[in-house]
Image (tube, rainbow, N blue to C red):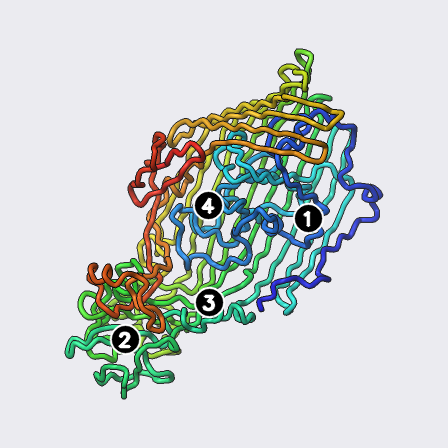
Amino acid sequence: MNNLHYRPLAAAVALCLLSVPALATAQDAPRSTTDLDRVEVTGTRIKRAEVEGQVPIQTLTRSEIERTGLTSIGEVLQQLTGSGSALNAKFNSSGNFGFPPDGSGVGAGSAQVDLRHLGAKRVLVLVDGIRWVNESSASGVGAATDLNTIPLAIVERIEVLEDGASSLYGSDAIAGVVNIITRREFDGGQVTLNYGEYTKGDGTQKGVDLAWGTSGDRYTLFLGASWTKQDDVKASTREQSRFPIPGTGLSFGSSATPTGRFMFTDPNTGIAYNITPNSGVTNPTFNGVGGCARTDDYHCFATADRFNFAEYNLLLTPSERKGVFGQFRFDISDEVQWYIKALANRRESTNQAGPEPLFFGPDGATGNPLADNIVISALNPYNPFGFDLDSSSNLSMIGRRPVEGGPRIFEQEVNTTYFATGLTGLFQAADRSWSWDINGMYSKNKAEQTNYGSYNIYNANIALGDPAICAATPGCVPLNIFGGPGTITQPMLDWIQPVVHDRSQNELSLFTANLSSDLFTLPAGPVSFATGYEYRKYEGEYQPDPITVRGHYNGVPSLPTSGSYDVNEAYLELAVPIYARADRGERLDLSVAGRYSDYSTFGGEFVPKYGLRWQVSNDFVLRTSYAEGFRAPSIGELYGSAARADLQLFDPCSVGLGGTPPRGSAANCAALGVPVGFQQANSQISVTTGGNDQLTRKPRAASPPASSGARGSAVMRHGPSASTWK
């Protein structure tokens, strides 16, 4: 079994600085009296003590987080029952899967949260009520938040709203809201050490968190630092993960093997071959014997010849994170407070995959014309067949996995910077108290990914072609893909194996202003409101390596992407008490909210929300709500350049593994011209998608129209309004 549970003794150990007596008390005790009439709750902008419990909030306190022994906010949130599958350290992929259609990239090394299985980019992540910048992992322009950019050491508590909140927070709050509250009031110092490992003695995780704070009559200061290191767990060390699909052996292994798979038609005899060299044979000869009863140095390719790439994979990817954070708050007066916050965080992470395969010929389906339309010259000194292998005539597919070049390794380096400042305050007017705040924030995620173990297919094309052309090309060495493991020499690798560098970044600039108070009083209590304005600007870009841009990269091709947009928003929220019986614990409240958003890319949109809360007794509450929302198209969906995704697509007319009959209708397959006995050579098919900067709002329709647009398309549906992005 794949046992990925920590040892019970691997718990967090907190070492207090005993010279600071303040730590004997609660570490976040208030430094002065607190006005309980004005509190902020995730899920509502109205600041009053009575609004607590109006919306379903799940709160994770710092003590609860520490008891988990986890060192990542993403890992903590993914333990929640309402959390779906999202990226974490167990996701081992970078460029080898390809690029999702939304242009967001793979997000390797990220930790995200997916509420209610609606997708991580539909969850809004706030820090102290302010948006956090989207992730960047140098594989696209991300549309979700990387929680690994926020050190766990700075967290006081986490509030999770599993409810649509677009009317209060904007379009990206479709699935819910995660609000991370930072540590503010802390007197003294604290050192927290973490250590853990898996029962097999691997996957060691260790870290150090430092916290220090002080306060005076008019100020508070908190400083925090964090270091966390996670070691890898290899798939080959667990029986469950040693093969691509557990219990199937090599059935789903790759057809690109270290010895090579050769599918072609002999132009001299017309015989079609699907063969692979016998093990241990170097520089084999070919004598033209067809069929499976062979007497030469080849045999017909079968399941036992497939390559087990799974043993190169990682079950747990290594990473190292370092972060520092500071927060200073100063009371300008009894009614006005100024704050300033800053953060710097660095993540270094690694993914690993099996040695990169080289596929040539149309059935290789790489989507790269240099590989799909290749001609391997008969004059190549290593070609044993004596004739050209030409994609336009006799070559179907060659699959060769150069294990000599080692596994594919993707190393990410992500740097996050964050700065925020603002004013909060109270004032009295019209016989009531008013709460207000204004905030400004700028943050950036900048990433670089270095890829080792990939190939330059342009150089490989030259090295497999006419040796005279290769000889006239500086640095070119003829390539041997026919001789089996060990026959690709270091000079050959030097010519075809580059180091690839990709870069990306996301930036977010933001300004908000909010106001909250009571309007008037009804028999059941005051009618409260909140209103505000928010401006945001998103900027993102992705720059792949020059050899990728030129189309010479053997891995997943992509092109540069860059774009930006801004949005102006205004909202209004009302809390109306309808009925209240304090002596019996009964209460009925109505909440109404609406938000108008004006996007520079497509124009304006209004979304409402209506909620009803019935407190039947002190221990029993019923809630119901109706909300509309939409998810605005991301930078990748708007401006993403053409990029490839290598998807597992199975032809229903193909004979399955082991000779199982096709899944599709025999009559339909025959009508489509598929010959009886056809077997798909490669189930990993390349699909090219891209963004569409013409995405715009369509009127409500009885049935959504088909999507369209330049360079691919993206369709995003609203909530109950049933509108469609096209």
Residue type, numbered disc 3: Ile
Task: Look at discs 1 and 4 and give the one toward the viewer.
Answer: 1
Badge 1 crowding class, 10 Å Cα cut-off, few under 14, some 14 to 19, many 20 or more, is: many
Instruction: Measuring from the top left, give residue 693's x and y in whole percent.
Output: 34, 38
Which label was assigned to residue 274? 2
Which label was assigned to residue 245? 3
Decide which of tag 4 and tag 2 comes sooner along the chain.
4
Instruction: In this rendered view, identify the residue nearer to me: 568 or 347.
Output: 568
Instruction: Tell me the residue at 34%/61% (across/down).
Output: 650
Instruction: Measuring from the top left, give residue 664's x and y in whole percent.
Output: 30, 61
Residue type, numbered disc 1: Ile
Q: Which residue is mark 1?
A: 65
Q: Quadrant of residue 605?
A: top left
Decide which of tag 2 and tag 1 comes sooner along the chain.
1
Q: Are marks 2 and 3 in contact (CB under 8 Å)?
A: no
Instruction: In this rendered view, identify the residue nearer to me: 307 or 192.
Output: 307
Local SS, label 3: loop
Q: Is residue 109 left or right of residue 48?
A: left
Q: Which residue is mark 4?
A: 142
Decide which of tag 3 and tag 4 comes sooner along the chain.
4
Which quarter of the figure is the N terminus placed in? bottom right
Local SS, label 4: loop
Q: Is residue 474 visible?
A: no
C-alpha distance separating marks 4 and 2: 42 Å
Q: Is residue 693 left or right of residue 578?
A: left
Q: Is residue 521 above or below residue 397?
A: above
C-alpha distance separating marks 2 and 3: 24 Å
